[in-house]
Structure formats: structure tokens, C-alpha cells
Amino acid sequence: MPFSEIPQEYIISSLIHQNSFLANGKLKKWSGDTTEVFSTISSTKAYEKTLLGTVPELGEEEALEALESACDAYGRGQGLWPTMKVVDRIACMEKFVEKMITKRDEVVKLLMWEIGKNLPDSQKEFDRTVDYIYDTLEEYKKMDRDAAKFQKHGGIYAHIRRGPLGVVLCLGPYNYPLNETFTLLIPALLMGNTTIFKPAKFGVLLIAPLLEAFKESFPKGVVNVIFGRGRVLASPIMQTGRIDVLALIGNSKSAKALQKQHPGSNRLKLVLGLEAKNPGIVLPDANLDLAINECIAGTLSFNGQRCTALKILYVHEDIVDEFNKRFSVKVDELKFGNPWDDGAKLTPLPEPDKPEYIQELIDDALEKGAKILNTKGGETSENFIFPAVLHPVSKDMRVYEEEQFGPVIPVVSFKDISQPLDDIAESNYGQQVSLFGKDIKTLAPLIDTLVNLVCRVNLNSSCQRGPDVYPFTGRKDSAVSTLSVHDALRAFSIRTFIASKDNEYNNAILNELLDSKQSNFVSTDYIL
Ligand code: G3H
């Protein structure tokens, strides 16, 4: 790949040595083992990965220290944070987001270096996260206003709100190390839970600029941030049985392993966003220009490293040749470059062994009868492998079964629509599907079936999580519980209420509680 000069503002001029972690309201100095953080992007003409800095390699002791801190702050429901007035929790979050905004440039730069996301998408990830926080604040106020009332049934008054669940262990993925992690952390915090957060395997240093903001915005112990290996840190935390919610976006293997370690599985709530193999189905009457453009975005945005990416394309046999020809040309036109290069759509892969893995999938498919359709497909450099369009793909190939999470596109041709439908029904995943076609007589029964196989049917458009107000969830191994701005607040809370028989004695007490404003829970005030 041609070497491009790194713009002055993105050069790594000094290494970032993150030498502390956040526990008990303090940035605790760490002088033990550290892990070097590398980028697969080269800073020199002759390829060499770039050292970005170091992070602490914490051990079990520090993990349990962070847990203790979160448990103390929750105080088994009696802590300052879970019993605080909603307005006061909102004020803490507003303070945090204002501080976070000042770190935009630093975080965007690290997003590019650490995970190879291009500049516009890195900026979008930051801005979308800030919007998500503001939208969540508004939604929480609305939820609170809707709850600011009493109802009466069967002679009993009830004042029903949502309360926190407890201590949340929060683990996010490397492809959205800021956004997806925060879509768990922010609603969990707002609802009054306390948290322990461990950044993903890549996209770690970019959390460092935010530690001070966490420390200064929330009471001690409410947010704890630890660095190190998941197995070393998360396992002992789970084994204590003191975690109330496991919030994880990532792989089902880790989710299952962590769940198993918790001694009280009935007490553990799960908020999980897991893997998927979202299919695109292209019907014979589809507008091909539109379908091809959407399939390009769906399969290859961020090199296919999205849980919502289109990971397999089913194209009707009447149009498959035409589709393949035009689609392959478009794939080859995509520009590969470093994240800051103008117009770079394909960028270096952050996982050093990913090109090799994608090559294995290609080799396996070729051995079993598929062909690479595009000229550049499979071209490899030190940190990238150019997306190969593979056809015909069959069920015995690894690329049919495995979630590639990277740049390779399997195409299956079909004659009868029951084939993709049966395949989706048989699959372990059930997140989303893209359906390309026009005739409503064909579309109507398909939609009616597909909505029961997945949780979002995208008509003539690629799959995606956003807009964040819409439900983000999945069936089977793809998710547990639903995330959206509104649903996430529900997922991290439970309905809890005060009830009292309608009589003069109780009503006088309730009135006094309301008038005096002494209770943080019993309140009919509107937060505007
Ligand atoms: O990795 C999965 C993300 O939730 C995808 O989000 O569809 O907005 O890229 P996105």
C-alpha cells in the first residue's frame, strides 16, 4: 500500500502513559506491570506498527478494589447515589458531558490510531455519543415527569417510579469503544446504579482523557474504571456474586463464560448485545443501483467490523450475475488508506491477526468451489486484506457459518425464497435483515415472516443500529434485552413504588411528604 504522510495534527508526538485507574473516587497511581498499546498503522515508510503508549495491567486485587468501591457507593441501595434526587443525578451527568466535549479532539485522534476508524466516522462516533447522552437525559426527564403522579386502584394509592438494580459490570466492544460502551454506562448510571467499567481490547487509551471527568462529575465509587485482561479482572469480580447486572456488548463466548461464574444466576440481570450474521436478500425486482449501494455500505462500512454489518448476501439467481458484476466493480473502487486520508473508506484492521483469519476463510471457500469475483479481492498488506467478493458460497464453507467481522463478502444465489428464510430460521443469530425488492405481493408475506426471525427488517436499506431512539436488540444468540435511548433506561432499572390505602390518616401523610419535599422518591415535581 502506498505510504501517505501523516498530517501534523495526527502525528503521535509523545507516548501516552496511562498510569492510574479510577476507584473509590480517586485516580490511583499504578506502578506495577503495564501493557504496551500499539496501532497497526505505520508511522514510517517501511512498515512498522506504532507504539501509542501504555496502560496498567491490573490484577485481581485491583479488580476487587474497584468492586468494593462500587458496592460501597451503592450501599445495598442505601448509598448516596441510588437514593439521590433525580435532578441531582441529572446535574452530575450534565457536568460530565460538558467536560467530555472538551476532549473531542484527543478522543477522535485516538479512535483513528487505536482502531483504524476513518476521520468522519471517528468524529461521528464521538458526536453521536454526546447526542446519546443528551437524548438520554431528556428521556429520563420525560420518564420522571410521567411518573410524577399517584394512581388509585382497588382503594389503594400508588406512586410508581423506576429504581436502580445495583452494581453493574460494563464491558464494551473494540469497534465502538466509546459509543457502545457509553450506551450501557450512561443509562446505568443515570438510573442510580454504580458501575465498574473495563475498556475493550482495542480503544483503551481513548478512555484515558475522560477519567478526570468521571472523577470530578460523580460521587466517589459511582464510576470505577479498570485496565487489564478480561479474564484476570472480570472473572474474580463475577465469582463474588456481588454483580447485579452484566452489561456487555461483544462476544457470546465471553458473556456465557462470565455468567457461569456468577454464583447466583437467578439474581444476575443481563444486558447483552452479541454477534450477528445479518443477511441481505436481493429479490429479482430490486432496484439494483440502490441495492448495490446499500450492500456496499452494509458489508464494508468500517471494513465490515460492525455487529450490524451485512455478513452474507442472498441474491436471486435471475439477477445474480448482473449484481455480482456491478457490485464487484464498486468494491474495487473503494479507497484504502489511513483513517485521516481523504475519502478512505477502507482502513487498517486493528487486530494484527485479522488479515490471516480472513485469508483462511477465503482459502476454505475457494477449496470448496467459490471464486473471488473482484480483481483486488484478497490483496494483502501488513495491516489489511482487500475485501473479496466470494461466489457461489455454500453451507459447508466457514464463511457461511462464521461471523467474519471483517472485509470479506459471501454471496449465495437462491431460486426459491424459502431457502434464505429457512437459513435465517436455522441460524443461531437473529438481529436484523436487509430486504431489497419492490412488489408488495412478494414483500408482504416476507416481512410478516422476517419480523419473527430477526428484530429489524430494513427495507431497501442496509442494517444499522441507529437512530438511537429505535430499539436495538436481537433474537437467539444475538442479544439479551433491548437498547434504545428509552429502553436502555428501562433495562437498567426496575419498577418500584409506594402504596397506601386511601384513608384520611395515610392521605395526610402523603400530602405532608409531598409538600415538605423531604423524600427524594415521593415527588410530583416536574423536571423541565
Ligand atoms: O457493532 C455494532 C453496532 O451497534 C453497529 O452500530 O449500525 O450504527 O454501525 P451501527
Image (spheres, grey):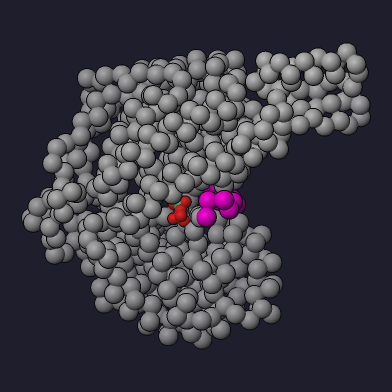
**As drawn, is 395 to the left or to the right of 159?**
left
Percent position of residue 377, x then y: 28, 71
Q: Is residue 204 visible?
A: no
Percent position of residue 192, x then y: 56, 26
Percent position of residue 313, x then y: 47, 70
Name the residue: 41% across, 17% down.
24
User: Looking at the image, is 375 positioned above or below residue 496?
Assistant: below
Percent position of residue 520, x then y: 65, 20
User: Looking at the image, is 268 positioned above or below residue 349?
Assistant: above
Image quarter (top left, top right, bottom left or bottom right) of the C terminus? top right
Residue 398 occupies which quadrant of the picture? bottom left
**As drawn, is 492 to the left or to the right of 362?**
right
Q: How many badges with numbers are in the image?
A: 0
**As drawn, is 451 to the left or to the right of 372?**
right
User: Looking at the image, is 418 positioned above or below residue 1?
Assistant: below
Name the residue: 77% across, 15% down.
512
Q: Is residue 240 visible?
A: yes
User: Looking at the image, is 455 positioned above or below residue 205?
Assistant: below
Q: Nearer the viewer, residue 190 or 338?
A: 190
Name the residue: 54% across, 21% down.
81
Q: Nearer the viewer, residue 266 or 155?
A: 155
Image quarter (top left, top right, bottom left or bottom right) of the N terminus? bottom left
Indicate yes or no whether the magenta region holds residue 122: no
Residues shaded magenta:
467-480
Name the residue: 33% across, 27% down.
212
Residue 514 occupies which quadrant of the picture? top right
Which secondary structure class fits the magenta region best? loop
